[in-house]
Image (spheres, rainbow, N blue to C red):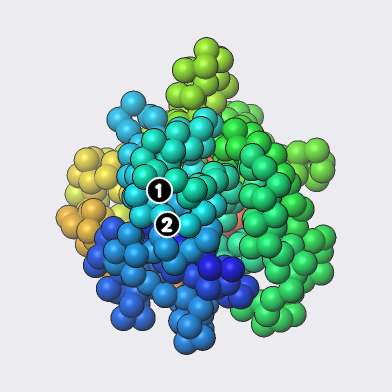
Amino acid sequence: MKISVIGTGYVGLVTGACLAEIGHEVMCTDSDAAKIRTLEAGGVPIYEPGLDQVIAKARKENRLRFCANPADAVPAGDAIFICVGTPPLPNGDADLSAIDNVARMVASEATSPKLVIEKSTVPARTGQELKRALSVYTRRPGVTLRVASNPEFLREGTAVEDFLHPDRVVVGVEDETAERQLHDIYRPVLERQFNCPVHAGACPEGPAPQWLVTTINSAELIKHASNSFLALKVSYANMVSDLAERLGADIGEVTRAMGMDPRIGPSFLNAGLGFGGFCLPKDLQAFVRLAERCGVDFSMLKAAEKINKQRIDRFFDKVREALWVVRDKPVGVLGLAFKPNTDDVRFAPAIDLIRRLLEEGADVRAYDPQAMEKARAILPEVAYAPSAYDAAQGAEALVIATEWPEFRALDWEKMRARMRRPLVLDARNLLLPGEMRARGFEYRSFGRPDVVAEPQIA
Ligand code: UDX
């Protein structure tokens, strides 16, 4: 099918590339001409495992094109995916102005029937407004512009795999034509009929993705409800983690046992510095705002947000307890991205933590395998180290702020030799207290017993 994708942020780029990968003819566009120039030159403006290969292959096979003029993309697709950003407004509402702009552009440029598909994360009822905007701005009689919703559940760091191997594909439609068109678009994914670039064709066994057809309102609600529930789960684990600390229990064992119950499930129970990124925090806020407008009490989600915002304070209590005086102390920080396997530092708890360390006068040296360039743009005052070992050089404390797997595999004896004081403050519970004790480190983390230095009695 001929498909246009408007917006080449995370969701837009992965959507466009993967739809081309499964056989569709895709035109991606963005109002950011510089980004389109980078893409046309073969660059990929985000770090996402496997995405660059998928884009390169689809371009080589002429199934994926980029154009800098969104108006040119409208005639190029029978189906148009809206993947523009919906960033948070100061009051927490989602900013829908980009969606509105696209609606007016599509309405004025469309010369043949189109299926206009919401892929951006939007509050419920946005589809109705989109439909109204399309109809008031359409100037050509007989040009039917259908609206549908198709929320995305991909995670940064595993986005290509999540798109090609989703648990479910959710569509919100108003008629069978739209349902059929969307089913045709996703058929290769639903029937697992594609050469998988992630698993080199040997995809893991497992149930085929579920196909869920509902109304546009429900589809929009499904996305916000899902993301907010994930945030709630993380905050619940963090809340229990604080109690585990007071009781001398081990949050890792508590959540592992909880997760063994399939009604709870093991994922999203990792206690730590809290959830960040460009999705969970803003979707939670927008969902709370939507509920307020509808007169529904969402205090449970407000509590989840409050707990999340307090994680930095919680962690800082540990920094002060361990270091006593923070000012002028060299502190190494491992991790800048909001989570591993991405270079994304938007709403990253690690960045908030570093800002706090700087406020307290610490001398910060930071390292991240992928996100240093993006971090440098928002935190130019920090020293960036070429390696984790360099970040630890002469440090009085080493903070783990993002749980990159490679940090677990570091030579910790070498780290210890580099540090002025062998003190690790693990904000992501990446390491194990017992192992760090055996390696001769002081070690503090969330919801687990601390390993403190034994006083040397002469
Ligand atoms: C999220 C949703 O998972 C995805 O379905 C949706 O489409 C977009 O938003 P993403 O933003 O990539 O994806 O990040 P995710 O993997 O959900 O992690 C979000 C945050 O929660 C990260 O900061 C992560 O460190 C934190 N987190 C996650 C925890 O603190 N504990 C956990 O157990 C899991």
Which residue lies most toward the front here? 141
Could you tell me which residue is drawn at 23 percent across and 54 percent down? 379
Residue 194 position within the rendered picture, expressed as x and y whole percent measured from the top left: 69, 76
Considering only order in the chain, which callout, 1 or 2, is on the residue closer to the N terminus?
Answer: 2
Residue 370 figure quarter: bottom left
Measured from the top left, where is residue 242 in percent x and y?
56, 31
401 vs 114, left or right, is: left
Are dots 2 and 1 in contact, CB under 8 Å? Answer: yes
390 or 262: which is nearer to us? Answer: 262
Quadrant housing the N terminus: bottom right
Q: Residue at image x 75%, y 69%?
A: 192
Element under disc 2: loop
Residue 152 visible at all: yes
Q: Which mark is residue 111?
A: 2
Residue that badge 1 annotates: 140
Identified by mark 2, the residue type is Thr
Mark 1 crowdedness (10 Å alpha carbons): few <14, some 14-19, many ≥20: few
Counting from the top left corner in percent of width and height, residue 224 is at 56, 36
Task: Give, as a three-letter code, the residue at label 1.
Answer: Arg
Mark 1 residue's CB less than 8 Å from ligand 1: no
Q: In the picture shown, does residue 327 fall above or below 435?
A: above
Confirm whether residue 349 shows in the render. Answer: no
Is the residue marked by circle 2 packed among few (<14), some (14-19), or many (20+) residues within 10 Å? Answer: some
